[in-house]
Amino acid sequence: GTFRMTNPKSFVTEHRPKGRTVLDPSVIERIGSNAIMEPLENRLSSLLIETTAAYIQGRGPHGLFHQIQAAMAENPNLKYYYLCDHKG
């Protein structure tokens, strides 16, 4: 079958330091999208690199932060740089 979002609305939300465009599909289209993406996400997440900071359950910026802390504990001379524009 085929699934397409017919006419998703969007709006800009202001986040520091920049605004973001957010899609706002109808409830039916959101349900359809989630029904497709949930099984795909379960299969594809294991293929992504372990240090991805994508918003995937069990990963994300907080998980990456803890990995950086663990690596620094193993090697105190380790230098790193991580830039994140998320402020929460």
Image (cartoon, helix red, strand yellow):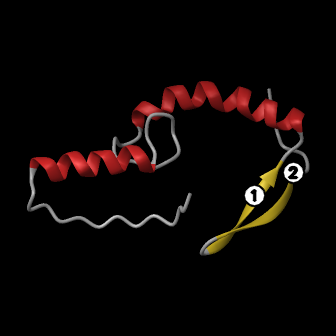
User: Could you classify mark 2 by the number of other residues whose Cα lies within 10 Å: few (under 14), some (14-19), or many (20 or more)?
Assistant: few
Q: Callout 2: helix, strand or loop?
A: loop
Residue drawn at x 9%, y 53% as measured from the top left: 75
Rendered-image quadrant of the C terminus: bottom right
Q: Which residue is mark 2?
A: 8
Q: Is 10 left, or right, of 19 in this rendering? A: right
Q: Which mark is residue 22?
A: 1
Residue at mark 1 to residue at mark 2: CA–CA distance: 10 Å
Q: Looking at numbered disc 1 in the image, what kind of residue is underneath it?
A: Val
Residue drawn at x 84%, y 43% as measured from the top left: 5
Rendered-image quadrant of the N terminus: top right
The answer to whether mark 1 and mark 2 are in CB contact below 8 A is no
N-terminal of the pair, mark 1 or mark 2, is: 2
Q: Is 3 left, or right, of 87 in this rendering? A: right
Residue drawn at x 63%, y 28% as measured from the top left: 38
Could you tell me residue 2's position as x and y percent? 80, 32
In the displayed orientation, state which residue is furthest to the bottom.
17
Q: Looking at numbered disc 2 in the image, what kind of residue is underneath it?
A: Pro
Q: Callout 1: helix, strand or loop?
A: strand
* Image vertical order of residue 30 relative to residue 74, above or below: above
Q: Which mark is residue 68?
A: none
User: Could you classify mark 1 by the number of other residues whose Cα lies within 10 Å: few (under 14), some (14-19), or many (20 or more)?
Assistant: few
Could you tell me residue 14's position as x and y percent? 72, 69
Could you tell me residue 70's position as x and y percent? 21, 45
Quarter-of-image position of residue 58? top left
In the displayed orientation, state which residue is furthest to the front.
88
